[in-house]
Amino acid sequence: MKYKISTCISIVYFVFACFFINSNVNANDIDAKINNIINDESWSDNYRNSLSRVYKKGPNFNHNDYVFTLGCGGGVICGYIFDSSTLSVVDFPTEFLIDGFNAHYNKGSNKICFSGRSGFNNKKYKNKCYRLISGELVKEEVCDK
């Protein structure tokens, strides 16, 4: 039994070390990519300022990622996720009408849920949830028993 416990502890330390090393390696790439976007004048000031405000506070989604939103005109909110694993920006599933819009997410999960109406086609989102996986928002399916 003692052998199994020490093996498990060794495996835990190994996994932790690999995660820690990988996160430090990626941190420079993440910082460089976000700073490139913030300094790239081909993006709108509103977009760059929104990302910059969130970036200064630190990751707010999926451990190392950044959710940011901005008004994009006509009473509509545009939202994005900077995905640190792919160094890319992922769009929300739609632009949302500001009235009634809500997004639920946290730093410890890759799950984000939306409520509100689409500013594109008026489709209703009532706590529709997605997972960020490899640079894509994948819709969670609800299964009835």
Image (cartoon, rainbow, N blue to C red):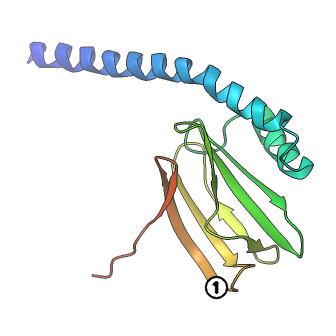
Q: Dot 1: what SS?
A: loop
Front-most of 42 and 39? 42
Residue 39: where, in percent of width, then height?
A: 85, 33
Seen at 77% across and 37% down, the residue is 37
Horizontal side of residue 1 vs 28, given as left or right: left
Residue 47: where, in percent of width, then height?
A: 83, 50
The crowd level at tag 1 (other Cα within 10 Å; few <14, some 14-19, many 20+) is few
Residue 97: where, in percent of width, then height?
A: 78, 76
From what the image shows, is residue 83 above or below residue 124? above
Front-most of 99 and 31? 31
From what the image shows, is residue 66 above or below residue 129? above
Residue 101, quarter of picture: bottom right
The three-letter amino acid code for the residue at tag 1 is Lys
| Residue matched to label 1 | 123
From what the image shows, is residue 16 above or below residue 66? above
Quarter of the rendering occupied by the C terminus? bottom left
Seen at 71% across and 68% down, the residue is 102
Horizontal side of residue 62 vs 49, given as left or right: left
Residue 26, quarter of picture: top right
